Image (cartoon, rainbow, N blue to C red):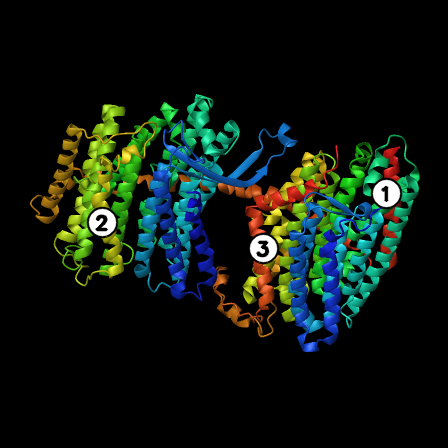
Amino acid sequence: MPIDYTANLHLLTPEFVLTALAFLVFTVDLFLPESRKEWLAGLSVVSLVAVMVIAILMRPSGSVELYGGLIVVDSFGLFFKIFFLAIGVGIIALSVEYGRDRFEYRGEFYGLLLFSILGMNLMAMSRELLTAYIALELLSFSLYVMVAYGLREARSNEAGIKYIIIGALSSAIMLYGLSNIYAALGTTFFAGIAEELASPGTVSPVLWVGVALLVVGLGFKLSAVPFHMWAPDAYEGAPLPVTAYLAIGSKAAAFALTLRLFAEAIVPAVDRWDEWQLVIAVLAAITMLVGNLVALAQRNLKRLMAYSSIGHVGYALAGIAVLGSDFALAAKSVVFYLVVYAVTNLVVFAGVTAYYNRTGQDNIADLAGLADRQPFVAAAIAIGLFSLAGLPIFAGFTAKFYLFAAVADGGFLWLAGVAIFASLISLYYYLQVLRQMYIERPPNPDHAGDGHELAEDHGEDHGHGDHEEPPVAPMPRPSLLLTATMSAGLLVVVWLGVYPAPLLGLIDAASAAIVPLG
Amino acid sequence: MPLAFLIPVFSFAACPLIILFQRWLPLRGAPLAILAIGGGFVVWALTAVSFLGASAEHPACEVSGITGALTCHFSTSWFEAGLPGVSATVDQAIHLDWGIIIDPLTVVLLGLVTFVALGVQLYSLEYMKGDPRFGWYFAWQALFVAAMLTLALADNFLLLYIAWELVGLCSYLLIGFWFENPGPREAAKKAFVVTRIGDVGLLVGILLLWVNVGSFSMTDAFAAAASGELGSGVTTAAAILLLLGAMGKSAQFPFHVWLPDAMEGPTPVSALIHAATMVIAGVYLVARAYPIFAASPEAMMIVAIVGLITALGAATIALVSTDLKRILAYSTVSHLGLMMLSLGAFGWTAAVFHLMAHGFAKALLFLGAGSVMHGVGAHGDVDIRRVGGLRRAMPVTAVVFSIGALSLGGIPILSGFWSKDEILIAVEHNLPVIFIVLTMLTAFLSALYMARAMFVVFFGPEGEDSHHAHESPVLMTGVMSVLAVLAIGFGWIAFNWPGAFDGIGGFVFYDHAEKFHFNYVLGALSIILAVGAFVLAWLVYVRRAISHEPWRARFASILRVVEGRYYVDEAYQWSIDRVVLTVSAALAFFDRAVVNDVAVNGPADVVRKAGVALRLHVTGHVYTYALAVALGVIGLAIFWWLRSV
């Protein structure tokens, strides 16, 4: 039966519009004088919002396939599309000031961002391995360029080179895995794979290697241990907004793909899945332990956030490992975790960016005394980190609660235990940052010596709090846009922490679209 | 009606807005708090009107099988936890709603809270003028009121508990508002700690109910208690635990010690605490959870006894106190005791009625006391022996304060008379005769100390501190005047107004609608006692016709005990010094040596060293990374293959 390649093509309108708008940004960039490049940020935000509206307005009822099943438009894809577009808006908000001060050719940056979001959208909609791969590459290529966007910074260049080399390696591995799977099963459609896997009988080693390689490829995108080593270097070298984007956007997209792949291709083959889920669980455990342990020893904020994000990937992977037991619960928890993780990280990165824009420093020790210099920035970072550590009343608590409960419910009590232990470790290094901001005093060049303090010391060791501490040099106020981003993010963090039911309802509806049959 | 949830939401929103933006707002954001509570009052009025017009036909309403009153629930899902698979190990799934309950009790309580809070905040505009933390004051006020309103609206125990704790927190913040001084600091700490002790009881009670009922829903818990499904032991235990919480918040013996000290806060805060928030939370809790209490005769008896002891003890202390605010504080304790007693005597309607009547009168009296302090320029204590004869300098305050005192003293036709009378009837009807005798005595004392405060401060000979007294600004006297009108006329809603209103007993009732009733013997007796007390006080303190000195001399030893407030504070102090601190010193040593040094720091060191060591695996060389990937691939494939074969 010939495939009708034009059926339902109108449902891809959001993607077509996004593509057109990305090109429009590139085109307008050619004609804009350097001083007006901010307009491109505005144009990009307008595009993203417009695409959001279009995507919501044009949503079909139920799932509709296009291109003979390569791509599906359903509520799962829609949810992630909106999510990605919102992430895009957040990243642009982070980039405006940073780009103005530190980017050359910043117009193209926004165009690249739009293309990468297009890639992410397609990743959430693909139902076929090669399509997914191409979408992934669209995202990756944009990211390679964006990571190296600090043209004159050696760090950024190094990060870009490392990222692209390891990225190319993992792409090759993934493609090889795809070819193995095709060789073994004769199909690359998720549904087809599920069908083949479910058929009884032994499976050829070729398939093992294929699936293993596929998981490695995804593991690279997710930066799961041991495929994570590129992440700290890339995070540290990349310009801050791009670091945020790596931590938030590319992770979320990779999980969207992983979720759909597992839900539609692997979990339905119940017998096989029972054999395999332990592998994912072990990966998850190693990932959260290594990520959080190594984070303890970091001195650079961006590297810290890299390891922290590796740790968080571990938690979410634990959710993937129990997809087979109570799918709705596990999928809901993972998706909710991703949303919360994204919003919280956005707040933290907005705070760090605000600090970096004013001072050019990104080591943890540089934050000393921030609470006195910019209380709001410090509070935003602190609340963000509390949420990441999973303390109530913030969203991170609710998200971890649901996720760990789902993991325990799925029969992996030990994994939930490891996750809680890892969270405990994470609290330590998050608190280190807080200690710098709230307890440590900044190095004060005016403070000549403590001679007069000694003179005032009368015998008993009491009341050293009474001494007037030297005033701290105030930091210039962060830009209005970053302040607004932090405020909005904080509101969401508290809202989701206190009253998650509405979002969970949406997520329920979204993950219902990929429930494995049977 | 569903919009009733907005009543606290306004004030909840006002609090952070004021804190964040007070620098840029007019009057430091105070109008925001007042607008919020004013909005709450308007919404309450609309809710009350629509509730009065509602019937059981309303989809959200039904006539409760337990209380017999029209009860409406509005809720939306908050979160769920406790998962299908886990249910094997954890008995129940937790399903929690944001839920509000609207029934007569809630309606009258919300009215009292919003109204008094509105008045107090308006009054505070003048009273707190010039305070360096003016904005913060109103922010905490807004939060306090919001918490109290949530408490009154909550239809599940968890939400109630959250609001309950928020009320405790706000009382701490407001009592200790002038934390630069040691007095308020200590008082705030005391209030927080003492009420916390009761709160633990409440929490355990809620959890006990949850374990046995399987949900936090009040409706479920009450149904289970009323039907006997809970079992009498659990019901009694739950009731006593809830009562513990109520005793802490409502300053019942032996947890009453915090309330008299709480006057260290700004006086309008005292008015709010004593009349509309905080202390009435405990009475409200017992009234709300009445099905649980009603199912346990033992618990009811305990409620009555606690109430009686508190009422009588506090009344005697009030009689010998010399500080105006302290007299009022012990009077509150005493009247809260009366409410508890009434609840224990199945006088549910009377208790709620007295809660309202007392609330208006006590708010009026405290605001009056604040006005006196404002007028004579006192900060902290107002010794009634040093102020006197203020009626000339402060005529409005004198009139309204007297109205409050007469009302609370139970002089007929004023509000307090009717509500007190209802309590007396309930006590006489349902409890042993000793109760009614002691209650009568309390009522007499109550009239006596109110008369004493009123005559000495306003009508006696002029005191040394009252020479420069002046009347308070219009905003303050205006608020007091409105409250005075209520202190006079509120009680008349007890009557049956044919065609218009069935009397409070036909609206706020438990089990069955009550008619207005009046026991002529009791009524006459209580009138004689109340009027007698006022006449006696007039003779002693104004006419000086009778001297109280010989009486003081004759009962010197008893007097010393009463003036020492029965040494409850001293007993606490002793037990804290000798018992609590000794035990905690031992625990602290264990904590430092074993828990901290060995159990915490040991593993922490291991973890940190592991982190430092593991860090080295990221070498910075791309080929290491590639090698790790390759090893990972091989490892995965082998692992996978091994598992499948």
Subunit that carries the residue with mark 2: B
Q: Amino acid at mark 3?
A: Ile
B198 versus B15 height, above or below: above
Image coordinates of residue A126 in percent, x first then y, are 78, 48
Locate the N terminus of chain B by quadrant.
top left
Question: Mark 1–mark 3 contact, CB under 8 Å?
Answer: no
Q: Is residue A68 left or right of residue A36?
A: right
Q: Nearer the viewer, residue A501 or B270?
A: A501
Q: Kindly identify the amino acid type of the residue bearing the numbered disc 1.
A: Val
Q: Which residue is mark 3?
A: A383
**Do marks 1 and 3 share a subunit?**
yes
Residues marked 1 and 2, same chain:
no
Give the label on residue A211, or none. 1
Mark positioned earlier in the residue sequence (1 or 3): 1
Mark 2 neighbour density, 10 Å: few (under 14) some (14–19) many (20 or more): many
Badge 1: chain ID: A
Vertical position of residue B18 compared to residue B88: above or below? below
Q: CA distance from mark 1 to mark 3?
A: 40 Å
- For this orientation, the residue located farthest to the left is B545
x, y (%) of residue B453? 19, 48
What type is the residue that disc 2 sits on? Ala
User: Which chain does the numbered disc 3 sit on?
Assistant: A
Quadrant occupied by the C terminus of chain B: top right
Q: Left or right of B437: which side holds B90?
A: right
The image's mark for residue B484 is 2
Q: Residues within 10 Å of mark 3 (few under 14, many from 20)?
A: many
Q: Are marks 3 and 2 on the same chain?
A: no
